[in-house]
Image: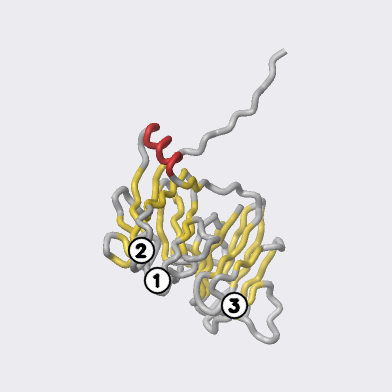
Amino acid sequence: MSSRVATYEQPIILARIVWQDPNTGRSHEFVLTEGATASIGRLETNDICIKEQHVSRQHAVINYRDGVFMITDLGSANGVYVNGTRITEPFPLVAGDEIRLYVPVMYFSAIIDEVEQREAVRRGTLITATTNTGKGKLVITNGAQEGHSIPLLLNSVTVGRATSKADWEICLQDPSVSRPHARLELVDNVWVIYDLGSANGTLVNNTPVTEKGRALRDGDVITFGQTVALFRGG
């Protein structure tokens, strides 16, 4: 009689982010696996926490899209720079890139061989992909509600401008947001976002959302009018 033993599939390690704290001189290393999303900011709830005065509470996000790690500014006050150039849309990272959050500097590099992988895991903090369970939340990253984390508790959630008569689930304090603006629906454990004919549009990773909707992935950056939100799934 044979028995089957469950095996654990080791995540594929692809890259690292290294940041040296100028105050302590200590290097912090973060290891990214295939599919990983890493939020960066001053708050401790970020995957990469940098407590520096020029860094916004939620400053940027690095996510894995179609075989490439992309970095996106989350509407930060002081910007994100790659190799000295300020980015204005999702930007693909390659080995050797220097990422600057106005003052703090990080370095992005690829991890190729198994020896390097083992050493990186030993030294650094491992950041892995989330498992899609249908849960989700929006983290507001700019404006009056910056830092607010809003769990998606219903299967259908409407987003709109905060007014005295607003009856939608997520109310944004932003005059550029319509009444209502967008809707998120849970379909087969995947969150899908639809624009509801808003005046200023809904963007996901800087791409307009149509009435047909767009499926969301962990780490997607959503813009409602001038309000930026980070979608976290899991």
Cβ atoms under marks 1 and 2 closer than 8 Å: yes
Amino acid of disc 3: Leu
Q: Earlier in the sequence, mark 1 or mark 3?
A: 1
Mark 3 falls on what kind of element? Answer: strand
Local crowd size for mark 2, using a 10 Å CA cut-off: few (<14), some (14–19), many (≥20): some
Local crowd size for mark 3, using a 10 Å CA cut-off: few (<14), some (14–19), many (≥20): many
| Residue 191 x, y percent position in the rendering | 61, 58
Q: Which residue is mark 2?
A: 104
| Residue 187 x, y percent position in the rendering | 66, 55
Amino acid of disc 1: His
> Looking at this rendering, what residue extends furthest in the top direction?
1
Mark 1 falls on what kind of element? Answer: loop
Give the foreground label among 3 and 2: 2
Q: Which residue is mark 1?
A: 54
Residue in view at x 61 percent, y 62 percent: 137
Mark 2 falls on what kind of element? Answer: loop
In three-dimensional space, the C-alpha distance between marks 1 and 2, rounded to whole angstroms, equals: 8 Å
Q: Which residue is mark 3?
A: 172
